[in-house]
Structure formats: structure tokens, C-alpha cells
Image (cartoon, rainbow, N blue to C red):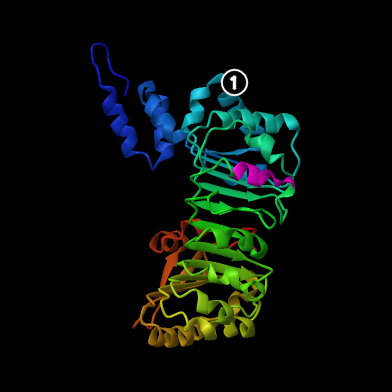
Amino acid sequence: MNSTPGTHIPQEIFNLIIEELRDDLHAIRSLCLVSRALCTEAQRYLYSRIRITSPRVFKSSRDFQTLDTRRSILFLTTIAYLNHTLGRFVQEFHYSPENGSRPDEFWLLVNQSLYYMINLRVFTFRNFVSPSTRALFWGTKFQLEEFYWDDGYTTDKDGELLWFLRTQFKLKLLAAPLSKANLRSALLPELQTFIGDAESIKQVVPHHPVTKLRWKGPDMPSAAPRITLAALAPLQTLSIGCPRAMPWLNVIAPYVKSLQVLHITGTRDSNEISFEFDHIASLTNLRVFVWSPLPWARGFYERTKQERFVVDWFKKMKKLEAVYFYIRNGETGEDGFLQWAPGERVPMQVTLQELVKRESLQEFAYLLDGSSSFPNF
């Protein structure tokens, strides 16, 4: 694609080519090897996302934006010291290697590279050995839209997460251990989605009327104070669960009249989940129900048992449009869902990606994935 002598191809043409290929990063990278003129525009796609993970995940991944901790040092060093402008293209930063400590020099390098990621919108941290949050984000200029933090603690130790949150005014999604944090409503004015345990929800939800909530166990709504339950009124999407079922739906149903999407995870046996299923019909505005159980609970509801429940629900719930049950294809090993619809006696099989896109559940995509055990978030 290099132009021959005397031939001039406007840069706008190269930009249009890259724009058309924006969803195929492998094709973009290949074109950059052919024409240097394409690289300038390609950088904002090639460097848009960085995922630092374990060597095992790195070896099995075909995503060249995924790096192990050793290879990430070169990438971070390039941004921190050699080419600061590359940092402005990074919009997502994900750190989730296998649990293990890193030297202080590594976290200093991360901080220095984050300083130049001024357009960062998503930050994810999952590791049970964490650095000082204050030191990690000191001096950074970005305004996040999504922030996930899981360091194995249930509280904001030393108040450092709260210190960081005070600098973020555009957060729409927050997942963090904030059980002892004092969050005022003015602190997160644009918050729409929160993911946390019961104690963190008590601190966040009464002051921030979120429309999407992930309520993770082990403590369940039945133990929540009335002020917390009353604050659930704006909820449109609720994901809830723990390693085993507990009586919660009969407690929470009077407070979630606007609920349209309900996702249940966990539960241990058929008797426990039956108790919850019997109360589903009380959610008269429910549009979508999704069940993704723990691995050992998947065999309790075969297709005939599913049909018995959904037929009754569709009769009682006039607004119910779809019911999804998690399945795993024994031949391909792929995750998916059986989708039941009103008037249909045969369910349709859909993929995880199709469900997420169809029902706008991007925030909870990892919770819907039944290939792993009960998720941290």
C-alpha cells in the first residue's frame, strides 16, 4: 500500500481504511506492517486497551492487547519514558494476574504510565496483593467511567479508595469494597451501577439512586435495614446471589416495583432455587429473568422442569418477554443459554455474547459466564 514515486494518497484515505477496520485489530496491525502511513491513525485502536494477566492466560490468549506482567513492563516503560503520546490512546486498563506481590518499582512504573493515560475510561484491578491506592493514582488526570477494585478486602483500608473516588466525578459504574466508607450523594453524581456486598451497598445505595445493582453474598437483603431497601426503588436491573440461596425475594419484592431485569447466581440445590422461583411472579414489571447457577447446581433443572416454571410465569406476568437458563454444550464445551419466549414450547439456544448484547447486560457479562466458579464481583 506504499505509494509509488509521484503518487500522493491523502492521509484521510488511510484514516477511512482504519476506521472501517476498527473492530478487527489483527487486520489493522497487519496493515501497519505494510504501510507506515496507516500507523498514525491505527495507534488509537491498537493501544486502546491493555490487559495485564498471568503467563498462563497470556499464552492461551490470541489477543495481542493482553500481556503478562513481564511483557507489560516494556509497554508501560514505553509510555512512561519513551513515547508519552501513546498513553492518550489507552481507554481501558485491566490488571488481573495470578495473586502475587510486585516490587515497589513496578507500581511506580504503573503510576508514571497512568499519568499519561489522560483519556482512560475503564480501570480494573483484581489481585489479593495490592499497592497503596493513593500512590498508584497520585497525580493522574483521567476521569473514569468504570472502576473495578478487588484486592481481597471487604473494607476500604486506610480510606485510600475513598480518597481516589473524591477525584472522580464521571463514574457511571463502581465495584469496590466500601463497607466503612462515608459516601455523600455529591461525591458520585453520575453513578448508575454499583457492584458490592451488603455492607458496601448500605453505604452507597441510600445516597446514590442507582438503576443497576449487583448484590453479592454472603449477606443478603433480608438482613438489610429498611432505609437500604427503600433506596432500591429506582432499580431496573438487579443481579443477586451467593453460594447458597437464602430467603430474600419475598423481602425485597415490595421495594423493586420498577425492576425489569433479574439475574440470579449461586444456589445449591433444587429445593432452594424452587423457593425463589415461586416468588418470581410477584415482580409484575419484570421483562427478563436470567439464571446462571454454580457448576454443581446446573443439573437440577432440565428442560422439562424449566418449561413448568416459565409457562406459569408467562401466564401471570404479562410484561415478561424472555427467560434464560444457563447451559453448557457438552460437545463443544461452550457456554450458552436456553431462551424461553411467550407462546413458544421450544426454547432457542443463544450464546453469552448474544444475551449480553440483546438485554444490555454488558456490566454483568462476567457474572453470566457460567464457566467459572462464583465470581468475586
Query: Nearest the camera: 19 or 194?
Result: 194
Q: Is residue 232 above or below residue 47?
A: below
Q: Is residue 80 above or below residue 70?
A: above
Crowding at dot 1, Cα within 10 Å, few <14 / some 14-19 / many 20+, comes out as few
- Among the 4 quarters of the image, the one containing residue 38: top left
Query: Nearest the camera: 51 or 363?
Result: 363
Q: How many marks?
A: 1
Tell me if I can see residue 292 in this picture.
Answer: no
* Start-end of magenta stretch: 158-165
Q: In this figure, which residue is indicated by the disc labeled 1?
A: 81
**Quick check: is 162 in the magenta stretch?**
yes
Residue drawn at x 51%, y 57% is 193
Q: Position of residue 337 (x, y in %)?
A: 47, 69
Query: Nearest the camera: 53 or 290?
Result: 290
Q: Position of residue 259 (x, y in %)?
A: 45, 71
Residue drawn at x 42%, y 26% is 33
Residue drawn at x 44%, y 38% is 26
**Quarter the C terminus occupies:** bottom right
**Quick check: is 150 in the magenta stretch?**
no
Which secondary structure dominates the residues rendered in magenta?
helix
Residue type at mark 1 is Tyr
Q: Is residue 316 above or below residue 158?
A: below
Query: Nearest the camera: 282 or 9?
Result: 282
Tell me if I can see residue 144 in this picture.
Answer: yes
Q: Position of residue 135 (x, y in %)?
A: 68, 34
**Left or right: where 257 falls relative to 18:** right
Residue drawn at x 57%, y 29% is 115
- Among the 4 quarters of the image, the one containing residue 2: top left
**Left or right: where 197 falls relative to 351:** right
Q: Secondary structure at mark 1?
A: helix
Q: Position of residue 86 (x, y in %)?
A: 49, 27
